[in-house]
Image: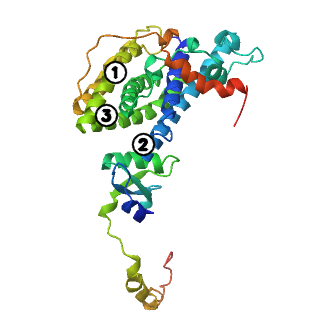
């Protein structure tokens, strides 16, 4: 087992992009209470992203890499490689997140479907990481798994209520599940050298998701089309727009602080 | 505030819930506020997100606001004023026995 910077980037980028997408609901969610719930989940993801990207930045620095090595468009004045370098100065091709998290929020049902699948993947992942040999990664996993358990609970509650709700909410929730399902396959692409091989997580994922879909009277989509590429930097067109908004302030005012 | 919310329900028509949080073991649940939620399960989740995000509690109760019967401000005189001049209801006319601490 080896904890490579690339592995940390994949985990950290998943959390960072998920946080940015969920944050788009702030002040726009269907209800004030849900607004706060989604913002809380976004902040959980952001917290995990910071821990993972800080770790990645330190590992990369220790390996002799500079800001220019990981972020080709970083200004020459930026030499230090930190979590901010990774978050604010990499282009889409340098991001390693899965496609699932960068997909647009769509309606509330699509957001819930994305959150259900992401948290059903992150929960067994972080749980397994909490027992891995790398102490720092294990500590991050132990902290994040409790948060993921709540994210899964929240998404499952809404999936059941929308799926088993009105005719219209059922139609939309089924459409959302059908639309997002293909993007879940990328999460479980085998990576035997990783601290936790993602391929081994799919059983736990299905064990969490399938009962929720059944209770929600939703059809579990067939496995077929399996878009991928996020882990190698080949993203959908949506990511660069997301990054433009997330990075514009830092790129316009390098080192800006609140 | 709760009276106002009852007469002006949320646009989606979600019912109002009153939230009680216990700060620590051994303390009583205390009313902290209200929220809207479609059912009890989600009311509990919303209460967790709205009222305990800064470690305010270890236990939460949610109660449908409609299930609470409250005294009316109009009844204030009849309910509470008669108690004002009945000092003998306070246990202040007893001799404290020697050695009884913490009274």
Residue where numbered disc 3 is placed = A159
Q: Are marks 2 and 3 on the same chain?
A: yes
Count of number-bearing discs: 3
Residue where numbered disc 2 is placed = A34
Q: Which quadrant of the figure contains the C terminus of chain A? A: top right
Left or right of A102 in this view: A177: left
Residue B1 lies, in percent from the top left, at 45, 63
Direction right: furthest residue = A77
- Give B72 or A127, whichever is nearer the viewer: B72
Rendered view: B8 above or below A145: below
Q: Which mark is residue A179?
A: 1
Secondary structure beneath label 3: helix
- Give A208 or A228, whichever is nearer the viewer: A228
> How far apart are the alpha carbons under marks 2 and 3?
14 Å
Q: Is residue A24 visible?
A: yes
Left or right of A253 in this view: A125: left
Q: Callout 3: 10 Å neighbours few (<14), some, many (20+)?
A: many
Residue A64 lies, in percent from the top left, at 70, 9
> How far apart are the alpha carbons under marks 1 and 2?
23 Å
- Give A87 or B56, whichever is nearer the viewer: A87
Q: Callout 1: 10 Å neighbours few (<14), some, many (20+)?
A: some
Callout in the foreground (1, 3): 1
Q: Callout 2: 10 Å neighbours few (<14), some, many (20+)?
A: many
């Amino acid at each position: 087992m080896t904890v490579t910077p690339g592995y940390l980037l994949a985990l950290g980028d998943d959390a960072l992009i998920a946080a940015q997408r969920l944050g788009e609901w702030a002040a726009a969610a269907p209800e004030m209470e849900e607004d706060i719930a989604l913002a809380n989940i976004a902040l959980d993801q952001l917290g995990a992203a910071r821990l993972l990207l800080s770790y990645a930045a330190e590992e990369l620095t220790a390996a002799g890499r500079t800001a220019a090595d990981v972020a080709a468009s970083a200004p020459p004045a930026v030499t230090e490689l930190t979590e901010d370098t990774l978050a604010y100065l990499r282009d889409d091709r340098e991001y390693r997140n899965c496609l699932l998290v960068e997909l647009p929020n769509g309606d509330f049902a699509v957001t819930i479907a994305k959150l259900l699948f992401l948290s059903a993947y992150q929960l067994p992942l972080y749980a397994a990481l909490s027992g891995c040999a790398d102490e720092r990664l294990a500590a991050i996993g132990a902290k994040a798994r409790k948060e993921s358990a709540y994210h899964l609970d929240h998404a499952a509650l809404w999936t059941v209520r929308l799926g088993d709700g009105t005719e219209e909410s059922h139609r939309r929730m089924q459409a959302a599940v059908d639309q997002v399902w293909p993007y879940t396959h990328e999460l479980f692409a085998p990576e035997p050298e990783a601290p936790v091989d993602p391929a081994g997580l799919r059983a736990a994922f299905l064990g969490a998701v399938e009962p929720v879909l059944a209770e929600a009277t939703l059809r579990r989509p067939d496995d077929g089309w399996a878009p991928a590429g996020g882990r190698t930097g080949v993203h959908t067109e949506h990511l660069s727009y997301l990054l433009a908004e997330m990075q514009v302030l830092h790129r316009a005012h390098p080192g800006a602080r609140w | 505030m709760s009276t106002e919310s009852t007469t002006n329900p949320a646009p989606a028509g979600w019912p109002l819930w009153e939230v009680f949080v216990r700060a620590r073991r051994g303390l009583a649940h205390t009313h902290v506020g209200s929220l809207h939620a479609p059912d009890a399960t989600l009311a509990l989740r919303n209460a967790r997100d709205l009222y305990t995000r800064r470690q305010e509690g270890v236990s939460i109760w949610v109660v449908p606001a409609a299930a609470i019967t409250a005294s009316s401000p109009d009844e204030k005189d009849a309910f509470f004023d008669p108690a004002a001049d009945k000092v003998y209801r306070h246990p202040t006319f007893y001799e404290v026995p020697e050695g009884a601490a913490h009274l």
